[in-house]
Image: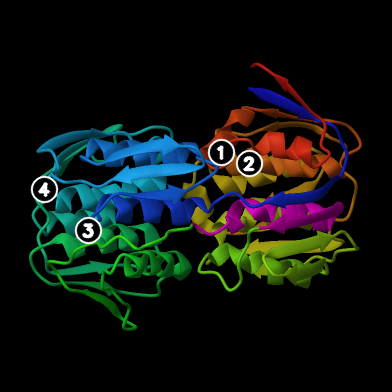
């Protein structure tokens, strides 16, 4: 699907969709719990559908209901299962140790860039603890054997999702375990979100500064009520677009938040944006912005949204420590630069950084989403800064994390024309 957006600013009020990161975690915990429950979730992305599918394949029964997901937990896991995580890196990395902890021989079918995304550190530790893995780096990866308790050692610089996957799995084993962090833990906020989800289900795990001690033989106990947070990662696009041109209020966001991408508030203030928080409503209005240097090592998913503000900011913006973006749905350093440059901006790939020279009006043009949801949204948010319309090729990529995104653009005053590819 291709879409064309007119060069008009966005204005109004919109409610944040549920946090994809939080919903992944709550659904997994709910599927391991002691009783059935419902999780409110008014927007279900393709990534969340992948997690639902994988949980059902492992013996749970999850169904979409009006405004949420009904969860009947796993009572007996199958001896083998076919799991399709779509293109969701979180789903794949969470379910790799989880399926092994349940003793399920698992056949993964992988799509897009998922087969090439880093897994070696996690595989090494799993193979040292009873699991045989075949088809590494291919579209068909197979796990056999049951995970055993013990000491796991992981670098914190590859993916926080390795830690989260093991944190879900190891409490189920019949002995105590320990995950040692061999260096600095990046994207620590996502691991904190996992720990909070576990705590909500009565599972004990904590970080002592160097490791995560995890008692075995634990039970997941369903809480009385569950409610996912609003999604800061996707809301950042609205906020950055408003800072560049327009005025917008996003409701349903909480501060403080364990979502690292809530850092967008302070980053926008550094740009010079007018940012006001009242209760769960965050309002941003455009005013002259100035270029800044931002270390995005802890918040790589913010980069495409921050590029929207950077293009509007006078002077140079440097988004540094962004090397992990090369391992996303696209090489996101390259595709962010390509999107900005395609519309007449000036963005440069600087190795593990993106350098944007901003402050000039864009001409408009064509952005190839490159199969990446955040590049599709980047192109849409840049349209307001253009003289001419913007066409996004493969715009359906936005459904990975935000189905209904272009409907919300329209609700905020955008003019969107859809054309089948």
Pointer 3 residue:
169
Residue at 39% x, 69% y: name it.
196
Q: CA distance from mark 2 to mark 1?
A: 5 Å
- Image location of residue 362, percent across then percent down: 86, 42
Of circles 4 and 2, the one toward us is: 4
Label 2 close to label 1 by CB (< 8 Å): yes
- Comes first in the chain, label 1 or label 4: 4
- Image location of residue 55, percent across then percent down: 28, 42
Q: Secondary structure at mark 4?
A: loop
Decide if residue 6 is on the left or right side of residue 139. Answer: right
Pointer 2 residue:
375
Residue extending farthest to the bottom is 208
Q: How many other residues sit within 10 Å of disc 1, few (<14), some (14-19) or many (≥20)?
A: many
Q: CA distance from mark 1 to mark 3?
A: 29 Å
Q: Secondary structure at mark 2?
A: helix
Residue at 55% x, 69% y: name it.
257
Residue extending farthest to the front is 224
């Amino acid at each position: 699907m291709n879409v064309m957006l007119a060069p008009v600013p966005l204005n109004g009020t919109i409610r944040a969709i549920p946090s994809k990161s939080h919903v992944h975690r709550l659904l997994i915990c709910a599927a391991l719990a002691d009783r059935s429950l419902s999780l409110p979730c008014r927007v279900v992305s393709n990534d969340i559908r992948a997690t639902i599918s994988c949980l059902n394949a492992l013996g749970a029964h999850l169904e979409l209901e009006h405004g949420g997901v009904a969860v009947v937990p796993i009572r007996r896991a199958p001896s083998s299962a076919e799991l399709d995580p779509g293109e969701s890196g979180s789903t794949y990395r969470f379910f790799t140790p989880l399926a092994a902890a349940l003793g399920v021989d698992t056949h993964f079918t992988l799509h897009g860039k998922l087969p090439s995304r880093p897994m070696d550190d996690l595989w090494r530790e799993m193979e040292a603890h009873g699991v045989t893995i075949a088809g590494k780096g291919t579209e068909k990866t197979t796990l056999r054997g049951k995970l055993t308790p013990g000491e796991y050692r992981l670098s914190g610089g590859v993916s926080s999702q390795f830690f989260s996957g093991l944190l879900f799995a190891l409490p189920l084993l019949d002995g105590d375990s320990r995950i040692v962090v061999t260096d600095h833990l990046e994207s620590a906020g996502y691991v904190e979100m996992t720990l909070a989800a576990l705590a909500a289900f009565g599972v004990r795990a904590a970080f002592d500064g160097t490791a995560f001690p995890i008692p075995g033989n634990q039970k997941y106990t369903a809480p009385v009520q569950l409610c996912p947070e609003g999604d800061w990662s996707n809301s950042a696009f609205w906020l950055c677009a408003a800072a560049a041109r327009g005025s917008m209020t996003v409701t349903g966001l909480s501060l403080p938040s364990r979502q690292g991408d809530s850092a967008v508030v302070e980053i926008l203030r550094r740009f010079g944006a007018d940012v006001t928080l009242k209760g769960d409503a965050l309002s941003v209005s455009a005013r002259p912005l100035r270029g800044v240097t931002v270390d995005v090592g802890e918040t790589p998913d913010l980069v495409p949204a921050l590029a929207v503000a950077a293009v509007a900011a006078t002077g140079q913006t440097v988004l540094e420590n962004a090397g992990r973006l090369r391992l996303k749905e696209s090489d996101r350093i390259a595709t962010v630069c390509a999107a900005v440059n395609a519309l007449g901006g000036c963005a440069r790939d600087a190795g593990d950084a993106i350098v944007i020279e901003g402050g000039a009006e864009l001409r408009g043009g064509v952005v190839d989403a490159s199969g990446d949801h955040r590049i599709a949204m980047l192109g849409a948010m840049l349209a307001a800064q253009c003289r001419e319309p913007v066409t996004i090729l493969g715009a359906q990529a936005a459904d990975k994390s935000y189905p209904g995104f272009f409907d919300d653009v329209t609700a905020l005053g955008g003019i969107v024309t859809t054309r089948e590819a």
